[in-house]
Structures are given as structure tokens and as C-alpha cells.
Image (cartoon, rainbow, N blue to C red):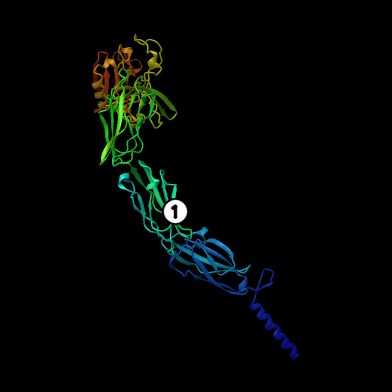
Amino acid sequence: MKYIKNLFLITVLSLSFFVISCEEDDNNNVVVIPNIDVAIQSPTDDAQSIGFNPTFTWTASGDNVDDFKYDFYIGTEENKLGLRAENIKGLQYEITKKTVMKGGVTYYWKVVAKDGIYEKESEVWSFTTAAPNVPVIVSPLNNALLIVPEGDVLLDWTDSAGPKGETAIYDVYIDTVNPPVNLVTSFSGDSQFNATTELTPNVRYFWNVVSRDDSGNSFSTETFSFDYLASKEPAKPTLNEEVVDGTLSLDESLVWGVVLGASSLDVYIDTVNPPLTKVVSDITGEGYIVQTKDTPGDITDVKTYYAQVVAKNIDGEVQSDIISFTPQMTGVYTDVRGSESIDYNWVRLGSQIWMADNLRTKKLRNGDDLTKVVQPTSGDYPITSSTTELFYDEHPVDNGPISGHPTFTSPWSDGSNGRVYSSKAPREPLIAPEGWHVINDSDVSTLRSNFSNASDLLDEWYGGADSYGANFVIAGYRYNSFDGGRPFGFRYVVEEGRVAFWLNGSGSNDVLELYPNGNYRSFNQGNEHNRMFGIRLVKD
């Protein structure tokens, strides 16, 4: 009996020891958990000035340590490490050339040890790589002017080396494009290169240097440029004009491209050869948009113009060859406003470009609709002095005589002669398309200085000569009420007697009138919205 009791006690103790050393799985099977531990060693935590290709080491201990494999994680954020290598069999890992790190950056890393089933994660340590020894250009400085007679062109930059002091290899790029792609030489040693044999005079060059080390790191200088000239004066401009059959179109440019060594340029345009009138001075750039004022004329006096560009610097100036052209006298402008598209003729009048048609849009430039005025009957006219809407109106269709007056002829009733607008319309910035404006006091002054007789601009319907294609014809003269003499608010006698346009002048309700007898007149029509007139536009 004593023997049985002792045997029972030994059995219980054995079972207790077994239970303490094991865990049960879901099926109550006992599972033995092996011992796994890993500790990272180098680079030490918070190490500084580490090379770009460090070797990482760690130690491990536990059951079956010889069978352990390791995963290596690294990143620039402590909580966002990426798996760089996995299933490493040894206790170290080296960053290779394919995974080059950046200089002057703090990195975080850790190692995970695995035995095939279980794993253990190390602490997360950090280190900062050495700042790169980046090459910097010394000379020639950016945008330098180099002269052939002054000697060799020496490209110079600061010394560069790898993070461990390795000798750098320099790749020198020189090209006529930016960034340069033409590799002219590669070498190690002094950080200087004589580029003279690689250069052609009167060319702009772009260059940079790339420094490489044995670890696969590379750093580039900025890209600088220099002009390589045969003499101290600027190169000769090559002047081209954007013309079609010798005609310079509206708003076209004189183009000369890059002029090496030029600090600024002057442009001459004139009717004499060589041109004497300087239209613009001390400009930079590669072209000039010819202004209407530079080539004044009209369709009865089509002139030939001559143009020349002069390049300047502190040592002298050089003239381009002279080109000739004739300015375009007439053309068509297409005004697109949302779903509306209208073609307007334009004509050159002296030093200005005028629309040769009255405005007939029903929209603002941004596509918003204008409001059509209702025909007034007894007090239902919608426009008052406090109205903020912009209104337009048009002659009614040809429907026979009214109160003994002649009918509205089709050029008005079909809208060809334009529409009339309320008084706030000419002062609305979006009433004119981009690049055009409602006629103003200055425009009229210029017009009168070139054409003193208004009848020369009036349409033949008035008995005018219309020698210049201005087609000045009234769009209408509309009142805010009607009677026997003002059918639908429009007056016949005005159509027959004079031309009236809104004038965006010094007053808020100014109107310009031109008469068949040759006179010009402007007046203020009085109360806001009392009458409606046509609008004529001029090029900015």
C-alpha cells in the first residue's frame, strides 16, 4: 500500500511539471514553445555620419538557434518600416548598390528572428547617414559671357568624395539643350576640365557635372549656361516675321530667337529703308508683337513697312538684316460666347483696328444671357433708372408701313446692322470680347485726327463714301415708349439722318453721333435707360 501511495505521488508531481512547461492547443493537445531572442548590435542606436552602404549586425539566442532565419526592416519613419530582405541565414545584412540610401537622412531599422513557426522582433534603432559631399560649380557662373579671344574655357567645381573618402569619378556634360545629355568626358582627379575643344563660337551651352563614388552614389551640380562668342559685341540677331504672302497678320510678331551676348534689344519699324522709327527700346526676350500704332494705314493706302532689330550690350551693338512686310488691312474676328458664335469684320483705320460691324450679341463674354426688352405698351417698359439687368433689343420684322412711315428694311429687321443696348451695357467689362473694348473718348479723338470728315466713314446708305470699309451704320435709336412717330420705340428719321453709338466716355450716358454732312458730335442722353443705342468696338 505504501508503495502504491508513493507511486501516485510521483505521478502527480510529474504531471504537474509537464503542465507547467507546456500549453494546450484548441484540441487540448500540449504544445511546447521554444525560446527565441534577437538583439541588434550595429550601427548603434542614434549613430551619426553612417556611410551610405552600412553593414547591419545582430545576435540571437534560443532553442535551435542554428536554424533561425531573419527578416530585415528599414524606413525613414519609426512606425512605417518596410521589409528590405527576408529569410537571411546569417547575423548580418549589407545595403547593396541596388538599394542605395540617401545622405543626411535618419533611418530606422529592426530585425525579426524566425524558427519556421514562431518569431521574435528586436527593438527599433535609428541612425543618420553622412551628409553627401555634393559638387558645386565654381566657374563660369550661370549666364556667363565667354569670348573666344580671351582664352580657354575652364570648367571648375568643388572637390567631391564618397562618404568614406573614396575618390570621386566626374562625368562632365556639355550640350546645347537643357538639361544637357551629351557626356563629353569622365575622369577622377582634379575637379576641373578644359572645354575649349568641345565648343563652337556663337553658341549657348548648358553644362553640369555628376560625381560618382565606388558605392554607386551619384550627385549632380546645378545646370549652368554660358554664351560662347567670337567677339565682345552681341551676336547678330536673325529676324524672322510671321507673314503669309508678305502680309503681317493682326497681332503677329517679329521673331528673332535667342541673341547671344545681348543685354537688351531695340526694334525699328518704318516706311523708309532702313527704318528710323524706334517703336520699342531696351526689351529682352525673343520676339515683339507688332502694335497697330506701329503700322498706321488704311485700305486705300496699303504701305510697305521695314523692320530691323538691334542687339546691345556694354561693348557695342549689332543690327539684324532688314525685312519688309505690309500690314493686314481687313479681317474677320469670331466672337464665341457659350453657344453663340458671331463673325465680325474688322478694318484698319489709321493706327487703330475697328470692328466694321455693330455688336449684335445676346450674351456677355462669359456666356450669361442678356435680357431682351419687351415692346412697351402702356407702362410695361421694364427698364428704370434702378434696373441692374443689361437689356438688348432689335428692330421688329418688316411688317408694312406704320403711321405713314416707311417699313423697317431688312438690314435692320434681320439683325445685320446690329442690336441696341441699354445704357449700362457699354460700361459692363464683359460686354466686349477679350482684347477689344467699347469706343471711348480717346478712340474718337484718334479717329477724328485721321478722318476729319465723318461722311468718309458712313455707309453708302447715308450717301457716305465709306472709302475705308468702316461701315458706320446705325443699329437703332430706341426710346422707352412709342407713338406714331416712334413705332416700337424706334425712330425712322434717325436711321435716315445720322449714326449713333454708345460712347464709354467721361459721362455715364455719352453718345457719339456722325452726320452725312461730315460732322462729329457727342452728347449725354440724360436719364439712365431712357434710350438704347448700338455698340461699336475697337481693338485694345
The answer to whether any part of residue 389 appears in the image is no
> x and y percent of residue 343 in the render?
40, 23
Question: Residue at the location (62% across, 70% down)?
Answer: 67
Taking the image as shown, residue 365 lies to the left or right of residue 92, namely left
> x and y percent of residue 14 in the render?
68, 82
The answer to whether any part of residue 95 appears in the image is yes
> x and y percent of residue 80 in the render?
50, 60
Q: In the rendered view, would you say 51 is above or below 463?
A: below
Residue linked to disc 1: 186
Q: In the rendered view, would you say 336 is above or below 410?
A: below
Q: In the rendered view, would you say 201 is above or below 472?
A: below
Taking the image as shown, residue 228 lies to the left or right of residue 92, namely left
Q: Quadrant of residue 263?
A: top left
Q: Quadrant of residue 134?
A: bottom left
Q: In the rendered view, would you say 208 is above or below 331?
A: below
- In the picture, which quadrant includes the C terminus? top left
Given residues 22 and 57, the one toward you in this image is: 57
> x and y percent of residue 310 in the render?
29, 34
- In the picture, which quadrant includes the N terminus? bottom right
Given residues 537 and 168, the one toward you in this image is: 168
Q: Residue furthest right?
A: 1
Given residues 392 and 46, the one toward you in this image is: 46
